[in-house]
Amino acid sequence: MKKYFMFDELGTNYRREIIGGLTTFLAMAYILVVNPLTLTLANVEGLPDSARMDYGAVFVATALAAAVGSIIMGLVGKYPIALAPGMGLNAFFAYSVILGHGAPWQHALAAVFISSVFFLLLTLSGLREKLINAIPVELKYAVGAGIGLFITFVGLTNAKIIIKNDATLVGLGHLGSPETLLALFGLLITVIMMTRGIKGAVFYGMIVTVIIGIIFKLIDPPTQIVGAVPSIDPTFGALFSSFNDSSFYTTAMLGIVMTFLFVDFFDNAGTLVAVANQAGLMKDNKLPRAGRALFADSVASLVGSIFGTSTTTSYIESSAGVASGARSGFAAIITAGCFLLSIFFFPLLSIVTAPVTAPALIIVGVLMVSSLGNINWKRFEIAVPAFLTIITMPLSYSIATGIAAGFLFYPITMLVAGKRKEIHPIMYLFFIIFLLYFIFLTE
């Protein structure tokens, strides 16, 4: 096993890999709670039960998707990178597709499945890297930052720090309410731990917030710690019913599929390069076994959609494990084992409420908007599409609309600026697709 995972070549050992794998799990374990709450729209009142996914099934699907994805990455890609349903993509799934477009959650899963199939085919054909390279780097950074703002906005509204205001659309909430105070406490304690460089600060912050919530009787204590594994039947394979529904085949759904595809493109590519570079695994500025790593991402997302969760992607939190010594795929296997064990702790994790997860969403948003510094704001023809991408996402409450706005304005501003040679031909195709997306958005 040491030879397979190249321990000697990478200068690592079992102890480092085990510690690194555990650290990565602690850093990203919050997804076990945040993802089910997000996909079930638990914080949105007035929705019929048919519009909500089953919480227990999504919890199991989240853990299984993370485990399967991490195992494939460890065994095939041989990188210390763990996977799980991605933040931002799950928000798009819930708040844009289900809540915004009014699509059934089965349709949303089908869109993830289709995008994953394309994802896999593009990876196997080698076209995936060409498409990624065709998109200007500034727009890639803008998409990441825009999603960060969107996630933060979702966190602030879930905690009722920001609320609806008839006069100004949004406004400051009632900060004295018990639930909001609990969320603010969670945010404060998480920020303090993050600032001190504590590994797994987001996860630990949630634990501390839950304890405080129980002490002040804002959260009901768990009746048991270990319990029966929830049934995955409500979501497993549910996506396939969409293909027999004529309402699924719309231009708006095409835009949704492409958004899943694009965002997954950017997220995976950026994470793989960032973590591999941190671990010193890059060679001649290239990622060894890149095809295998991308294959792991594609299959994980495909499997996750069948289980019943949003797009599964590589996690930047894997950098915490790398900082703890992880260098090989064995660490990803350890992380996968932790996700599998977590399935049996559903009763314990189910007590986590919106005020507890809101700080995690806000902090993840803070981390994602760091890409703003990589955009060349002095070039107006770049600044306009980048800004419109970033600002449109939270204001329209739609990641897809933000991407569409940026991709529409980019070729226009570049052509007017006389930068025609800098526009990749594929960007014109994207322009047409997103123009149709806006025209038929209400279908």
Image (cartoon, rainbow, N blue to C red):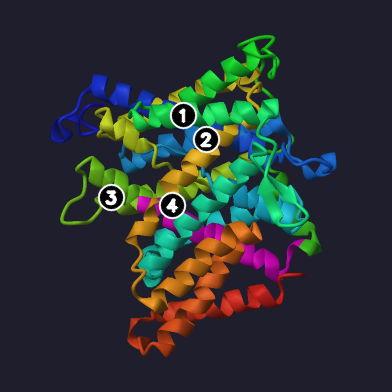
| C-alpha separation, residue under disc 3 versus residue under disc 2 | 32 Å
Is tag 4's residue or tag 3's residue first in the polypeptide sequence? Answer: 3
Q: Are marks 4 and 3 in contact (CB under 8 Å)?
A: no
Is tag 4's residue or tag 2's residue first in the polypeptide sequence? Answer: 2
Q: Nearer the viewer, mark 4 or mark 3?
A: 4
Residue 438 location in percent, x, y? Answer: 66, 74
Q: Badge 3 is on which residue?
A: 289
Is tag 3's residue or tag 2's residue first in the polypeptide sequence? Answer: 3
| C-alpha separation, residue under disc 4 versus residue under disc 2 | 15 Å
Q: Badge 2 is on which residue?
A: 360
Q: Is residue 325 above or below residue 396?
A: above
Q: Badge 1 is on which residue?
A: 190
Q: Nearer the viewer, mark 3 or mark 1?
A: 1
Q: Visible in this render: residue 290?
A: yes
Residue 237 location in percent, x, y? Answer: 68, 43
Q: Residues within 10 Å of mark 2 (few under 14, many from 20)?
A: many
Is tag 3's residue or tag 1's residue first in the polypeptide sequence? Answer: 1
Q: Is residue 267 magenta?
A: yes
Q: Badge 4 is on which residue?
A: 369
Quadrant of residue 126 within the rendered picture: bottom left
Residue 161 location in percent, x, y? Answer: 64, 39
Magenta region = 248-270
| C-alpha separation, residue under disc 2 versus residue under disc 1 | 8 Å
Residue 343 location in percent, x, y? Answer: 58, 23
